[in-house]
Image (cartoon, grey):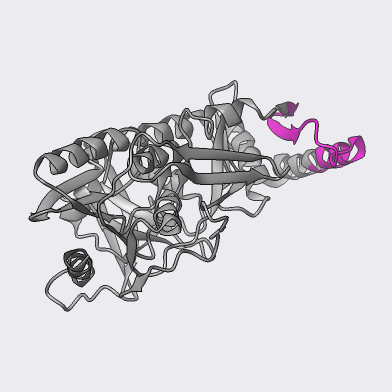
């Protein structure tokens, strides 16, 4: 569940305002990476790290049985540096991984068509949804399946973005995965295909009540939302249900663009970095939806979805229905490096308009209602309709 930034003051402006440099030192075919300009890294500490890498390299040269690529060792050092921070949301990407990661931002890629989430405590990766008409659905992947292997390598605890990268590849190539379902290990072979997933689905459920489901906040989601919103209004929509269940987040500025159409003038969200510096996103007075709203959420509603739900709740312009949200109240920024690689770093906490940081807590709905799989209908959606009919 990633929270990312596009080209707004939450994205490019912040990235340009942070100085980040990496010095690469050749060590007999390996490499050592050091952050420069950080006061806590003294010359003696650098020398100590350099000496230890040389010592380890000597053991590798003398005893290591297999051949290896210098590039793989170098990338391993960079990845290890970021992993040592103990934050599953902070990672190093090789140029190939970074390019693949950026492709998914635009909603079209070659892969299997499954939405995944990761438990921040255990590192377990599970299936949230297998999209209709994709290899994931055709292979029988189900919500709740635990993804534990990709191409024979265990993925628990790995950066979710990199796992997704491994699932993608050239069209018509195969990827082998292992899942755990009800305690049983299942192995599957899926053939990658071009995946184009619309992030917005909508319909007029009944007279005057519109429904918009947002699966992710990606690059074109705000445009897709506005098209759906205007179409529903042309059909006579006066009240609105927005479904954010299983929405793992996405681009902050896209989320804010949508909220700007719904909220009165004021703060949408603000962030604070390690220096206490604040950046705020605002809604203007030009747009405001004055109809009744319900927002559906669950435990897989995370990150940007929680920015959305938190703003709606704090302004009191809508009713939240469902279960406690995921609880990811921190923001990551991407920093591209000169060689085409990149790092993703947790840079700030975000706060709802009322000043609440919900990291590792989540947002409690106004109406707490578990989804009933045996109800035969979507009981949470039915409750939303009841609320709007009575309003």
At 80% from the left edge and 38% from the top edge, which residue is drawn? 54
Q: Quadrant of the C terminus?
A: bottom left
Looking at the image, residue 245 sits to the left or right of residue 308; the answer is: left
Say above or below: 183 vs 299.
below
Q: Is residue 133 visible?
A: no
Q: Hey, which residue is sitting farthest right in the picture?
A: 44
Residue at position x 35%, y 74% in the image: 368
Q: Position of residue 355 (x, y in %)?
A: 57, 55
Q: Position of residue 389 (x, y in %)?
A: 16, 65
Quarter of the view holding residue 109: top left
Residue name at image x 38 percent, y 37 percent: 257
Instruction: Confirm whether the magenta stretch covers residue 32.
Output: yes
Whether residue 270 is visible here, answered yes or no, is: yes
289 on left or right of 39: left
Residue 320 spot, x, y in % from top left: 34, 63
Residue 128 at x, y percent in the picture: 31, 59
Q: Nearer the viewer, residue 365 or 267?
A: 267
| Near-viewer residue (94 or 153) | 94
The residue at 33%/63% (across/down) is 319
Residue 326 lies in what quarter of the image?
bottom left
| Position of 336 relative to 110 (above/below) | above
Q: Which residues are magenta?
A: 24-52
- The extreme bottom residue here reads 374
């Amino acid at each position: 569940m990633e929270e990312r930034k596009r080209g707004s003051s939450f994205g490019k402006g912040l990235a340009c305002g942070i100085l980040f440099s990496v010095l690469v030192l050749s060590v007999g075919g390996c490499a050592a990476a050091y952050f420069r300009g950080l006061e806590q890294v003294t010359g003696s500490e650098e020398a100590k790290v350099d000496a230890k890498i040389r010592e380890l390299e000597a053991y590798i040269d003398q005893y290591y049985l297999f051949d290896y690529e210098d590039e793989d060792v170098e990338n391993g050092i960079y990845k290890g540096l970021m992993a040592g921070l103990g934050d599953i949301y902070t990672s190093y990407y090789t140029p190939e991984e970074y390019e693949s990661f950026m492709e998914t931002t635009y909603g079209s890629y070659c892969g299997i068509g499954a939405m995944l989430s990761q438990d921040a405590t255990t590192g377990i990766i599970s299936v949230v949804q297998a999209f209709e008409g994709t290899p994931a659905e055709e292979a029988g992947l189900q919500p709740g399946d635990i993804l534990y292997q990709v191409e024979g390598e265990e993925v628990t605890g790995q950066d979710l973005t990199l796992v997704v990268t491994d699932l993608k590849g050239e069209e018509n190539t195969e990827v082998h995965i292992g899942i755990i379902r009800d305690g049983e290990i299942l192995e599957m072979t899926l053939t990658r295909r071009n995946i184009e997933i619309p992030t917005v689905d909508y319909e007029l459920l009944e007279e005057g009540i519109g429904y918009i489901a947002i699966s992710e906040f990606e690059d074109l989601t705000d445009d897709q939302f506005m098209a759906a919103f205007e179409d529903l209004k042309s059909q006579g929509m006066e009240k609105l249900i927005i479904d954010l269940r299983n929405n793992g987040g996405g681009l902050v500025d896209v989320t804010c663009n949508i909220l700007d159409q719904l909220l009165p003038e004021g703060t949408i969200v603000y962030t604070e970095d390690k220096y206490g510096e604040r950046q705020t996103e605002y809604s203007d007075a030009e747009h405001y939806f004055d109809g009744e709203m319900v927002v559906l959420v669950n435990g897989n509603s995370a990150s940007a979805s929680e920015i959305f739900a938190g703003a709606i709740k704090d302004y009191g312009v809508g009713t939240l229905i469902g279960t406690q949200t995921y609880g990811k109240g921190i923001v990551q920024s991407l920093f591209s490096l000169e060689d085409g690689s990149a790092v993703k770093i947790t840079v700030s906490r975000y706060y709802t308009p009322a000043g609440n940081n919900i990291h590792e807590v989540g947002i409690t709905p106004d109406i707490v209602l578990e989804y009933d799989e045996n109800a035969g209908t979507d009981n949470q959606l039915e409750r939303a309709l009841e609320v709007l009919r009575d309003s």
